[in-house]
Image: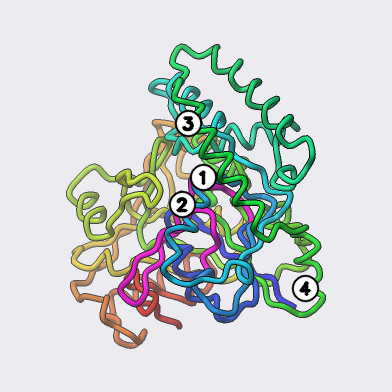
Amino acid sequence: MTVDLILGLQWGDEGKGKIVDVLTSSYDIIARFQGGPNAGHTLEFEGNKHVLHTIPSGIFHPKAVNLIGNGVVIDPIIFFQEIDNLAPYGINFDEKLLISKKAHLILPTHRLLDAASETAKGKAKIGSTLKGIGPTYMDKTGRNGIRVGDIFASDWNEKYQKLTKKHIEILKGFEDSHELNLDEMEAVFIKSIEELRKFKIVDSEHYLHQAQKAGKKILAEGAQGSLLDIDFGTYPFVTSSTTTAAGACTGLGIAPNKIKDVFGIFKAYATRVGSGPFPTELFNEDCETMGQVGNEFGATTGRSRRCGWIDLVALKYSIKINGVTQLMMMKGDVLSGFNKIKVCTSYQTSQGFQDYFPYDVSDEDIKPVYEELAGWNENLTQMTEFSQFPQNFINYIEYLEKALETPIKIVSVGPDRAQTIYR
């Protein structure tokens, strides 16, 4: 019996989807434990590119069962857009996809509230994807939410109308209430609910407990990144759920003592989408090069990602709060061609040098302190063995491994499933 976790250690977009896809053949169950369609996991193999928002990243493998856990929030409309996009691949969803009864539903009015709230913040906006995630989690913690299991209840329509009316009253308090055609949105939503009833809706925690008892291997998949965690991220510029290892326990019902390995995913540099502090952010040609070569555009929103050098202060912090046992480095190929590679090793503050992640990294006094390593020019994307890597790239990997005190077991040198090097 094994339960392993896979987590992003930066501000999301680290490449978790690819690694889940690569590892799935070793697991019986892939279980998504938090977030919603604000996440976008991109998978590439056999010349095709796939973007998943709600469905776990193991869906393309023939044997693994994929579970959407109780910690996830689901927009039925977006969910069925995903299902439709997967239609050409002949996936048997009856056998391969399970949905937790306890997962919460994103209503059309949640999306309207998200848009109105973000507009009202003005320059202080968080950079929400406007998918209704925040308002849905607010209703969940406020004990007003509607769960997937409620769609089978005799009072389903009453619950839906009650919460929708509450939202409409709240929207009246915003100057820009984003009054879209709610009737049209509701018609698509209700149709999607009818389709959702046809899927396998389960008591997911019981299913996973039985699977563990039967010796099944489970991989828990997170969304976003650790620095977007509601408690430990760069608050308030964070997501609305627990993106760290603890989220797998609350988002799936897995006991902490059942977790074995925690796989931490990070980029060879750093990126961030939307607003919020980013100590190593660049505003020069290096940033442009990283963005263009790395195709740094959000899988969900299409927004350009902000780019910068790797931040070891933040990475060490994420490794500690997650209990990471193995690291996997993504997009090493993007740094080919840089004469010098910079690594942030500490922050310079008004109180002196600081090598731990502070309460507020948005403080204007915080300045990254860098060490420089020699770069490399070789194209890594066609390399298939670690021994083929240029020495300077190996030096970079070994430098990071020593600084982070955690082994780097996988190095990715391209978006395709085949461009994955094991150490």
Instruction: Give how far across and how far down residue 141 sits, in percent.
Output: 71, 35
Instruction: Give how far across and how far down residue 95 sits, in percent.
Output: 63, 71
Contact check, label 2 and label 1, Cβ < 8 Å: yes
Task: Residue at 46%, 49% (x, y): give it.
Answer: 11
Indicate which label's residue lies in the foreground, 2 or 3: 3
Q: Amino acid at mark 2?
A: Gln
**In front: 123, or 210?**
210
- Quarter of the figure that contains the C terminus: bottom left
Q: Amino acid at mark 4?
A: Gln
What is the distance, in whole Å, between disc 3 and disc 1 at their CAs? 12 Å
Residue 212 image label: 4
Whichever of callouts 2 and 4 sits on the residue coming sooner in the sequence is: 2
Instruction: Name the residue tied to disc 1.
Output: 77
- CA neighbours of label 1 inside 10 A, class few (<14), some (14 to 19), many (20+): many
> Is 177 part of what is drawn in magenta?
no
Task: Residue at 41%, 66% (x, y): give it.
Answer: 43
Indicate which label's residue lies in the foreground, 1 or 4: 1
Instruction: State the extent of the magenta-drawn residues as a range.
Output: 33-57
Instruction: Name the residue tied to disc 3.
Output: 184
Indicate which label's residue lies in the foreground, 2 or 4: 2
Q: Determine the secondary structure under disc 3.
A: helix
Task: Residue at 67%, 27% (x, y): give it.
Answer: 161
Q: Quadrant of residue 162?
A: top right
